[in-house]
Image: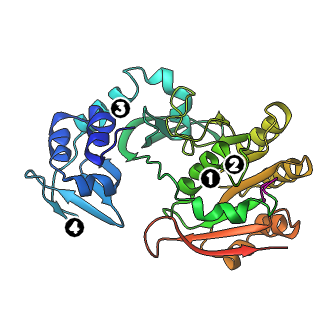
């Protein structure tokens, strides 16, 4: 992946945009490029950039403003030129991705889609007449999970501890999980390397493009990309000989069953869940059931108190 924020933007993101938007984004300074998390195109609305915790518009001179009504106005041409570039002018080839509401592009960046949803029965068949796009910029933050290794590895270093990463949206849980996969797969002098499987239902953890991870998840890591979590965990258990399974955003009854099967099979599970606290988590019936099984021995609670990925608390369940 390109080293600087501006280089990443120029090589991996800008090729999908019309020339006016390219020119505007190229005017951003390096610090802004490094902090840029999302680029949102909504037809007939201002181009919005999420930089850190704030949304900005950008004017013709490349100046950022928090004035939501100012700045460059996105047109239909901007939307459809981006869609054509993302899909290589073949929406049919991306039918499954469109049905799921996003397309992952080279570099592991994810483009969320909105428009007219077409149903087949009660299921989403596809999306057409696109009205907005959300480019989420993927970045690996190496060693951000390093402080967790003494907790996640057992005292003798032989096994990993079943761990739940609890976090509200945009607090870095996916970044933490990605780095944990990398660290566990590489190992160290203190901790032996593990065989890791990532079940990446939303193509965010490894950022796979055409099946190949675009982000460093380690040399002993297998990735089941775009695979439903519950099915993927069972598939991994049966065929990939993992020592650790990592997956994102559990919360369904079938996830609970799969996690218990993995743990009963001697495989450690590290996963995340949306919540701001343990109390909030325990108010959900499915998660309350999972916690009552004592399957997880460690909870890591994240917040944005000092930026994304801030470890607010670590709770052990003995």
* Lower position in the chain sequence, tag 4 or tag 1: 4
Magenta range = 157-161
Mark 4–mark 1 CB contact (< 8 Å):
no
Where does the image place residue 94, in percent across and percent down from the top left?
A: 50, 26
Q: Are marks 1 and 2 in contact (CB under 8 Å)?
A: yes
Furthest residue toward front: 189
State which tag comes first along the sequence, 2 or 4: 4
Whether residue 48 is visible, yes or no, is: yes
Nearest to viewer (mark 1 / mark 2): 1
* Cα–Cα gap, marks 4 and 1: 35 Å
Distance in Å between CA atoms under marks 1 and 2: 9 Å
- Establish if 38 lies above or below 222: below
Label 3 environment density (alpha carbons within 10 Å; few <14, some 14–19, many ≥20): many
Task: Quickly name the residue at label 4.
Answer: 66
- Residue identified by numbered label 1: 180
Name the residue: 31% across, 60% down: 51
Q: Residues within 10 Å of mark 1 (few under 14, many from 20)?
A: many
Residue pointed to by mark 3: 83
Pointer 4 or 3: first along the chain: 4
- Sequence-first tag of 1 and 2: 1
Find out whether residue 175 is within the magenta segment: no
């Amino acid at each position: 992946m390109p080293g600087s924020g501006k280089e990443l933007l120029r090589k991996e993101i800008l090729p999908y945009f019309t020339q006016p938007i390219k020119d505007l984004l190229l005017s951003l300074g390096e610090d802004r490029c490094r902090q840029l998390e999302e680029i949102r195109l909504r037809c007939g609305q201002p181009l919005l950039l999420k930089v850190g915790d704030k949304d900005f518009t950008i004017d013709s001179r490349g100046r950022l403003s928090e004035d939501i009504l100012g700045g460059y106005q996105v047109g239909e041409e901007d939307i459809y030129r981006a869609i054509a570039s993302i899909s290589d002018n073949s929406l049919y080839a991306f039918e499954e991705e469109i049905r799921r509401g996003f397309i992952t592009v080279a570099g592991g960046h994810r483009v969320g889609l909105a428009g007219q949803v077409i149903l087949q029965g009660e299921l989403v068949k596809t999306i057409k007449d696109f009205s907005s796009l959300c480019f989420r910029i993927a970045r690996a933050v190496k060693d951000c999970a390093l402080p967790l290794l003494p907790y996640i590895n057992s005292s003798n270093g032989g096994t990993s501890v079943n761990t739940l990463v609890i976090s509200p949206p945009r607090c870095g849980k996916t970044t933490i999980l990605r780095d944990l996969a990398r660290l566990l797969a590489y190992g160290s002098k203190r901790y032996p390397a593990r065989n890791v499987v990532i079940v990446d239902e939303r193509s965010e953890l490894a950022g796979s493009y055409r099946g190949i991870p675009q982000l460093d998840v380690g040399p002993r890591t297998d990735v089941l990309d775009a695979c439903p979590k519950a099915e993927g965990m069972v598939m991994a258990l049966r065929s990939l000989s993992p020592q650790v399974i990592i997956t994102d955003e559990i919360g369904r009854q079938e996830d609970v069953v799969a996690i218990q099967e993995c743990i009963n099979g001697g495989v450690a599970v590290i996963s995340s869940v949306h919540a701001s606290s343990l109390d909030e988590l325990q108010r959900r019936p499915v998660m309350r059931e999972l916690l009552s099984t004592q399957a997880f021995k460690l909870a890591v609670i994240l917040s944005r108190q000092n930026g994304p990925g801030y470890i607010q608390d670590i709770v052990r369940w003995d």
